[in-house]
Amino acid sequence: INKAEKIGPVRSVRPYFLPIAKEYDALLAHSGGSAEALAQIETLKVNNLEEIAWWGPEYFWRVYSRSAPHNLFTSTDKLNQAVIDWKLADQEPIYRPWVFNNDLDNNFKINQVEKITIAFSADKNYETSWQYSTSTNNYARCQNGQAYRDELTGEEIVAANVLIQFVPEEEVLDAVGRLKIEMTGTGKVWLFRDGARIEGTWRKSSPEGRTIFYDAAGSELALKPGQIWIEVIAGEKQITVE
């Protein structure tokens, strides 16, 4: 199992994070959150590793060379200890696994795509792209035109699967800019693997339910063994495929 000595920055929680954590019954590490999110943690009975609590220093630390709130970190060792302390280590996972295969069916290789670019906002600093490499059979991530790298190792971030999960337009709730994003229901999905784009749908019946991806024929999409990155796109963001 790969270990990370530093994970972060750990930020506050929002309601649309909770259905993702809940479908795995995961231990959710965070620092505070919106009032709605904190209330839903209790309602949904999410395993709650809250930094703003008396045990915060046991599982998190702050790097004071960086400005708050971007300076809170944890590690795999600390998170693994939290799993033990929360008595979750011996629990068998009950979520439904996704389907995987090594070789993509030739029927899905028709729509070849080498690059995916997502404009998350008008600010180019947040423009994200994924470039496919035939030599590695992976997708390398860039942000604002620069390679996206692990801060500790310097290694480029790559994924064997990139999924774009389309969800309804976000709703702005207040002047601060808090958002409502619907993560349950159904919608369109694009899977990029092996240099090809496969179009289908996603379904999630409830906050506790598993998000499952299907192809146009209704069969469950098979992912490639390896790293999986899901980009959640709310509304009509500009996405370019080349």
Image (tube, grey):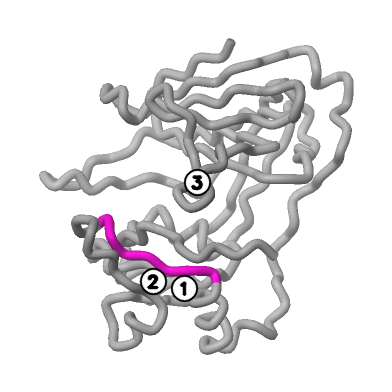
* Residue behind mark 2: 41
What SS does tag 1 mark?
loop
Other residues around mark 1 within 10 Å, as few (<14) / some (14–19) / many (≥20):
many
What SS does tag 2 mark?
helix
Name the spot of residue 143 as percent of width and height, x first. Answer: 42, 29
Quarter of the image containing the N terminus?
Answer: bottom right
* Residue behind mark 3: 150
Q: Which residues lie in the magenta part? A: 70-76
Quarter of the image containing the C terminus?
Answer: top right
- Give the amino acid type for the residue marked by disc 3 in the picture: Asp
Q: Earlier in the sequence, mark 2 or mark 3?
A: 2
Q: Residue at x 54, y 69 (%)?
A: 76
Q: Earlier in the sequence, mark 3 or mark 1?
A: 1
* Residue behind mark 1: 46
Is 140 placed left or right of 55 in the picture?
Answer: right
- Give the amino acid type for the residue marked by disc 2 in the picture: Ile
Q: Nearer the viewer, residue 224 or 68?
A: 68
Is 56 placed left or right of 22 in the picture?
Answer: left
Q: Residue at x 35, y 86 (%)?
A: 55
